[in-house]
Image (cartoon, helix red, strand yellow):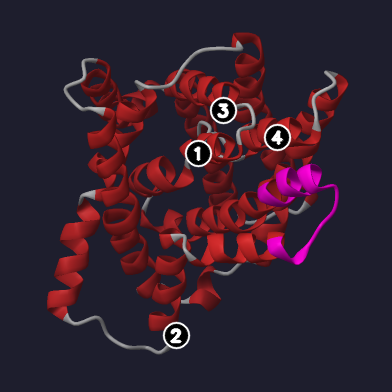
Amino acid sequence: MLAIFLKTLPFFAIIGLGYWAGRTRFFSAEATSYLTKFVFYFALSAMLFRFSANLSLADVLNWRLIGGYLTGCIAVYGFATLVAMLRKQDIATAAVEAQCATIGNVGFLGVPMLTLLMGADAIGPVMLVLAVDLIVFSSLIVILITGSRDGRMHIGVLKTVTLGLLRNPMIVAISLGFVWSALEIPIPAPMNEFLAILGGAATPGALFAIGASLAGKSAERVDVALWLTFAKLVLHPLFVAIAVLWLIPIDPYSASVVIAAAALPVAGNVYMLAQHYGVAPHRASAAILFSTVISIATVSVVIAWVSQL
């Protein structure tokens, strides 16, 4: 396990460097925002497009993997929602808490880290996990919050969800990459080099941006944040492991990647959604902060365990 920890340590060290830069104001909030935009819209999109364009959708698409991962996610989502309801939280707040317990930082942390630590073949399962998170659960939270406020579902909600998906550069990059692959068009050498150079900035840029953004996170509602951290770092990978190893078993390698992806800390876009809708943003902020710090140890433990599968 020490060897795994030493391999993950450089990733979290870059996050720590970003946190220092944000905390000391060497990187202002505005600078962090622009760095995040660069990574989100350009570097990470180039990396995902290049990966998917060199893959065959038929080889990557694994419905058992999707079913197993989704089953584990629904279990922890439902459990977190139940706990919130027992604490007499409203539907919107329960949706934000369930999102914290279910959605990990797969895009900014999982794609670069897991593909380097677990091998290039990890990109297929990781992209399926990312697709489920973005398409299913990012849509679900919008539906629940909007529906709870309006008291009913209407066509405007579906329009908001659809436009949100179409405007997400990660979904667009993956989709265009698979279309390119399906058409069997070779990537010209200059274009491939361009994507490789630009995509190479995704790993350090994303990790640094995570750390810098954490500097602005508050630690209010500590008790709730610690519960959500436990749900994300322990319950989520546990429920996913039960699903992909026993309920809907898949091959050991894919299972190990999916479980490792489930062990990642709370994603930053949960806070963005919570802040946008004005629903428990401080709670989501604290959960992101605590889960990221604690995941320095827990992610290493999970990867060390799944590497034995």
Q: Earlier in the sequence, mark 1 or mark 2?
A: 2
Under circle 1, the secondary element is: helix
Identify the residue under disc 4: 98
Q: Earlier in the sequence, mark 3 or mark 4?
A: 4
Identify the residue under disc 3: 281
Bounds of the magenta segment: 142-156
**Amino acid type assigned to the residue bearing label 1 in the image:** Met
- Using a 10 Å C-alpha cutoff, classify the residue at mark 4 as few (fewer than 14 neighbours), some (14 to 19) or many (20 or more): many
**Amino acid type assigned to the residue bearing label 4 in the image:** Ala
1 and 4 marks in contact (CB < 8 Å): no
Q: Which mark is residue 272?
A: 1
Mark in front: 2 vs 3: 3
Identify the residue under disc 2: 182
Residue at point 60% right, 33% down?
Answer: 278
- Using a 10 Å C-alpha cutoff, classify the residue at mark 1 as few (fewer than 14 neighbours), some (14 to 19) or many (20 or more): some
**Amino acid type assigned to the residue bearing label 2 in the image:** Ala
Mark in front: 1 vs 4: 1
Q: In the image, is residue 152 part of the stretch drawn in magenta?
A: yes
